[in-house]
Every structure is written in structure tokens, then in C-alpha cells.
Amino acid sequence: MIRKVTISILILLTFALARLDAQSARVNQNRIEANLLKLATYGQDENGVTNRVAFSDADIEARNYIISLMKQVGLEVSIDFAGNIIGRQAGTLQKLKPIGFGSHIDMVPNGGNYDGCVGSIAAIEVIQTLQENNLKTRHPLEVIIFSNEEGGVMGSRAIAGELGENALKVRNNTGFSMGEGIMRIGGDTTRLDEVKRDRESLAAFLELHIEQGAVLDEADLDIGIVDGIVGLNWWDVVITGFANHAGTTPMNRRQDALLAGAQFIQVVNEVANQYEGNHVGTVGRIKALPGAPNVIPGKVVLSLEIRDLSTDKIQMLYEEMKKRAIKIEENTGTSFEFIALDTTGKPALMDNLIKEEIANAARALKLSIKNMPSGAGHDAQDMALIAPAGMIFVPSAGGISHSPKEYTSAKDMANGANVLLHSILALDNKL
Amino acid sequence: MIRKVTISILILLTFALARLDAQSARVNQNRIEANLLKLATYGQDENGVTNRVAFSDADIEARNYIISLMKQVGLEVSIDFAGNIIGRQAGTLQKLKPIGFGSHIDMVPNGGNYDGCVGSIAAIEVIQTLQENNLKTRHPLEVIIFSNEEGGVMGSRAIAGELGENALKVRNNTGFSMGEGIMRIGGDTTRLDEVKRDRESLAAFLELHIEQGAVLDEADLDIGIVDGIVGLNWWDVVITGFANHAGTTPMNRRQDALLAGAQFIQVVNEVANQYEGNHVGTVGRIKALPGAPNVIPGKVVLSLEIRDLSTDKIQMLYEEMKKRAIKIEENTGTSFEFIALDTTGKPALMDNLIKEEIANAARALKLSIKNMPSGAGHDAQDMALIAPAGMIFVPSAGGISHSPKEYTSAKDMANGANVLLHSILALDNKL
């Protein structure tokens, strides 16, 4: 009897100590910072600015670096047919569905070193911290580094089964289409169907990310808990005028596609400013053809992006912009065509239990928190279609993002990684 | 005595017959058309559209074709250090200064097959017609095919000694700078000084060209006699805002360089329309950086071109546009920089005697004529700095130019070539 009691006490003690180990486990801030700075060297130019658009040589080199980090911490690494890098670790109860977490390492042109990278490096750090603390999870764990996030959350859309044929034709500024890019990074466009995962195939998905806005930084808060991610629609607006000689064509005989494009850019701004709300409308890319100073542009192709938490609101704003383009057509002798690009991100709500565990983890770490929406699209948005999802934000200095001036302190990165670690441990117990 | 008279009569008869031969000489319309269509194949894509920007591989191939045509008609061919192709033929009085004529074969991006090419092919045709009719000129003749006309009348500026160091840095859409381009086409940037010709080193310079406007075509006239060529100034306008994330940066916190650029394009149009006159203002090239749909552009570079017969008017319009940019800077939180490009073309008046002989030649050929200014810049503009210059225009269908739809009939090309031929013969006698 005494022996049985002793054994029971020992078992309980072991559990309690393990629990204590779990509670006291902390990520290694210096290692996070070192790995992040190392990642930033892939695609870095002589001015210290990193360019690493998806499918570029720099992207491929950085992916190899991530794979080597994953292998160092003992993850079993594979690349799915959409080019997502997946690192797996068994759980003690292998029949449980995996808990997934991760982010992306591709960048917008002339972007920053924190967007996506913080969540990617932190995800690997979580695995290493678990090991260093001899912490085993019941659930299998999956670190997912998504392919081509910035060019339309490609990898996560493929997993959610939302990557359509048309999306494969979209080219980024490497000159490669998504289809070509997938082949370049070790995927296979003929087998994308196999990438798709069933609904509820993951127990949960978590993504740590920089805020990319100024809310946390300005209020001096540590952690943002994302309530939902705004929806995002992209169009190509093709304006056709008539290319002609700039010297011999009088002002009143021109059909200047760039003048029409300029008027439309103002319409986008006016309409976005005119309505109440947190929506945004942006023209970020423009091409005027033929593109010579002495030729009146005959064709302009520009991008239109509208974001809001409501799909209806996005549609309303779009219709209003389109309506005003008719007047521009009349005034400039041009014609407008709106081509919806298959890079649609639907608004996505985050899971309540996960939000709660993120809050608990942050509070236990004595970190200040704030619930907030995400104005930026994220892989978690598509992952929310197949699994309960949650997002952890850490501050962006000055709210600057998609810029080489993007910055998050090592302390903030470590805070976010610790919250990610402890949210995973809590969910591992509860799910 | 009788013998002397007989000899005199025979000599006079020979001259009169020669004169009659000269008057009845006509170019070969079919050959002009065939050579022009052959020239159009250099750089032609699968849709039948020719792209042949200066320094491109297609440009180099077309230059080789021109050199082979020149050699076929017995011209002594050389390439000067600015890459101009020069075909020389001796005169009967070698001490006389040469009469020069020619045009260019490079094209604007997505341009047409007649701009420059008509005058180039016709110049070679004139040589062949002289030979076929056993017509010798007193003056040496020089057929000049100028390099990189569309990218800032490079070759003719070098001959006029007006090609500055800065111009060599200007890049066209092949990615090559003028300096690199000159080396590519057989020139030598270290010896450009030697290309420069003295004032009055040519007896005359003539250029046949398509009108590139609708005046001749709409009035159903055969030949335009150019009174003068408008001046032209180019600037790069660099607009600096702040690149930021399009999803997380509210409308009222943006410093959108493309929105500022759009407002400036409208200012260019408004200012050009507001003042009386034949001036034109054009934005033909625009680049927004970083150039992704989901990033607010932090930088825009656009081209500004203003043309007028008066340099003062150009300056006044420019100052007005620049003044209005200050308001845009304030409204958008951006800053404007205006960089004058070294591609300035000064207004140039054509020589009265040459204009008269062009008119005489056209009338003798029973062609209708009209005196007119040229809204387009031409090599003749810079050649006018070193020699008496004249320009012959032939109709452009619908006034369309710098477009693949550019067209001039074979009949009109032959008319122009015949006027060129007989103007040269008349000037050869008078100068």
C-alpha cells in the first residue's frame, strides 16, 4: 500500500515537475535574433537591403537555410506539391491530429526582414525550446513555412484547397508565374490537389507575426491577439487608349491611357476616403505602354486592391470606383476593363479557445495584451478554413512594414515566441 | 571654226541630254516598298509587330542589312564613333563639300515601320537611281543613317557636337545606356569628339520623313515642306513618399508617391491645355516602386516632355507645372524632384534655299505641297546646327505614328524619294 502510494506520489511529482518545467520553459532570445539576422542575409544587397520575392534565387537559398535549421532541431522535413516546407515531430499520442504553426519567409519587393520571418524563426525556436526542456507534446507538431505568401498566400490557399487554376498564371516581379514558381521551389503543379487538407485535419493552427501597423507600438503593448483578418480583393485594371507620337498629336486629339489611369488612381483614393470605416483601397503597381517619354501611352495596366472585414463593403466600394471610371472613359477617349485576379482572401475570424489560450499564456508571462483585427492578409486566413486558427501579433516599430525600415526588437520577438510556445503547450493539453 | 562650233554644240547637246536624263529620272517604287518591308522583318514578332529599339539585337541586325544595301549600290561604308552608318560616294568635283541626306532605322518601343525607315530606304534608293540613270553629281554625297534617334537624336547630336557626357548615362528599355549602346553598335565613347563636324562642313543636309501627324493626309496633299522643327525638353520627375503595407496603413496615414504622381500627370495635362498654342506636354513613362499591389508606392519616377517652337514657352510651361507640384507635395506628404535630362532639342529653322528647291522639285513632279512646322524632333534639327538643312514630309495615314498602325503608301514613299532625288540634283547644281 505504502509502496503504491509512494509510486503514485512519484508519478504525480513527475507530472507536476514536468508541468513546472513546461511553465518555466523560455525561448532563447539571442538565438532567435541571430537566426533572423542570418535569414536576412539571403538576398541582401551591398546596401544591406534584402530582396527576396518568392521564386527568386534568394528565396530558394533562404528556403534551404530554413530546411537546414529544421533538420538541426530534428524535424522530419518535406516539401509539399505547393512548395510549402513542412517540418514534422511526432507526439506521444500519435493518433491525435497535429497542431500546426508557422509563417512565411518570402518578401514583397523592397520589403523588410521581420514580416513572416519572425513567425518562421520562432516556430523552429519553439521546437528547439521543447527539446531543450525535455517537453513532449501529446499532439504531433507541424511547423509550416508557407510558399509565396506575399504573392497571394499561395501555399496556404493550396492547403485550404482554394488555389484556382487562374492563380497559377499570376506573375510576380521575378518574371515567373506561380505555376512556374511552384516547379522552381520543388513543388508540382500537376499534383496540387494532393496538397489540399480536409477540414479539421489539424487540431489547431497558430501564426506569430509582426503587427505591420502602429497600434501596439504606439500604445506600448506587448502582444496583439487577432480577432479576425480582413478580406482582400485584387483586380487588374486595363485601360486602352491609343499610342501616338507625343510631338505631332495635339492635346485635344489624344487618347492618353496614362492620363485616364491617373484619374482612376485619384478615384480609388477619393472613394476610399469618402466612406466611413477601416477599409483601404490601393494602387501599388502600374505599367504604361509602350513606356517611352515621347509616346502617348496607348495602354495602362494597374493593380487595384480593396480590403475590409466585410465582403459586401469591398464589393460596394469596387462598384463605386467602377462607376466613376465610366466618366473617365468618356473624358479621355479610353476604355476600362476590370479583371478580377484569383488572389481573393475572404475575411476570417480566429478561434475563441485559441484566442483565450493566447491571452492566458501572455498573462502568465506578464505581458500586456490587446485584441485587434488584422488589416493585413496572412496564411492563417486560409488555414482558418480547415482548422481552428489563432494569430499572435508583436509590435512593429512605428507601424512600418513592407519596407526595409521594418523593425521588431529581439525582446518583442522573444515575447511572441514565448506566447506561441505556451499557447501550443496549453492547447496540447486541452485539445 | 566650224569644228569648234560643232564641238560646242555637241557639248551643249550632251549637257542638255544629261539634264533631260536628270529630269526624267525616277526612283523605283516597288524596290522602295520591298526594301522597307524587308527592313520591317528585323525585330518582327509572331504577330507581325516589329520591335527595334536602338542597341537591341534587332537594331544591330537591321543596321547590318542597311550596310549590305549601301554596299550593293557601291557606297563606301563606315561607322563613325557615335555609331552612325555613313555611305559615301565621290563627286565629280571632289573639292566641294558633300551633300548629306538620310534618316534613322531605330524605333520607339512598340513603334511603326515607317518613321525613319522611309527616309533611310529612300536615301539609298536615290543613290541607286542616280547610278541607273548615269547621273554624276558635282558634290560628294553622304547617306547618313543616324544611331539612336528615338532615344534623344543621339547620332546627329554627336555630329553637331551637342552630345554631352550626361546623355551617355540615359538608358533605354533595352537596359543599355547610350554609352553602352554606342560600344555595342561599333562606336567608341572615348572618341566621340572626333565625330563632331565643323559648321558648314556639309553643303546641305536633307531628310525625308513621314509627317507623323494628320495634316497632309486629311487635306489629301502629297508633300510637306518643313519650315522648322519644334524644340523639346525632357525631365525625370522623382516623387518620394513612404512605402508601407497597404493593409495596415489607414488612408489618412499614407504618403503615397503614386497618388502624387497621378495628380501631377493631371497637372501636366491641365497646364498644357490651359495655354494657347501648339505646344504639347506628355508623361509617357512611369515607374512605381516597389511595384506590388499590396504595397503603397514609396517612390515614383515619371518622364515629362514639353515641346514648342519657342524655348521660352517651354520654360514657362515647365515652371507652371513645377509650381503646382508644390501643392501636391503638401497634400500627399511627398516630395518632388525635377531632373533635367540631357536630351534637349532646340527649335530649328530650315534653310530657305533648300525649302525652295524642295518646292520646285515637287512642282516639277506635279505633286501638291504644303509648308508646315514639325511637331516631332528629327536628326535634321541637330544637323541644322552645322549645315543648311531641309526636310520633306510625306503623309502618315490617319496621322498615326509611334504605333504599329503607322502607314504610308508606296506611292507616297516614292513621291517623297523623287522629291529628295530632284532636290539633291538641283542643289548639286546651285551650291
Image (tube, coloured by chain):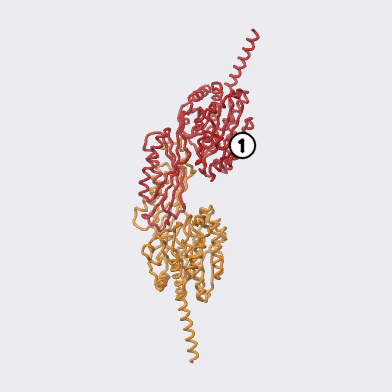
Chain colours: A orange, B red
Q: Is residue B190 left or right of residue B217?
A: right
Q: Position of residue A34 (x, y in %)?
A: 50, 65
Viewer-proximal residue among A417 and B419: A417
Q: How many marks?
A: 1
Residue at the far top in the pictured view: B1
The residue closer to the viewer here, B365 or B64, is B64
A341, above or below B137, in the image: below
Chain assignment, label 1: B
Name of the residue lying farthest toward the bottom: A1
User: Residue at coordinates 37% horizontally, 40% vertically from top-left?
Assistant: B320
Residue picked out by circle 1: B65
In the rendered image, residue B55, in percent from the top left (x then y), is placed at 56, 41
- Toward the viewer: A125 or A320? A125
Quarter of the figure with residue B48: top right
Relative to A36, residue B214 above or below: above
Which amino acid lies under the numbered mark 1 shown in the image of this protein?
Answer: Tyr
Few, some or many C-alpha atoms within 10 Å of disc 1 (few <14, some 14-19, many ≥20)?
some
* Placement of the C terminus of chain B among the 4 image quadrants: top right
Q: Is residue A90 visible?
A: yes
**Image vertical order of residue B161 relative to residue A424, above or below:** above
Q: Position of residue A240 (x, y in %)?
A: 46, 44
Which quadrant, please, contains the N terminus of chain B?
top right
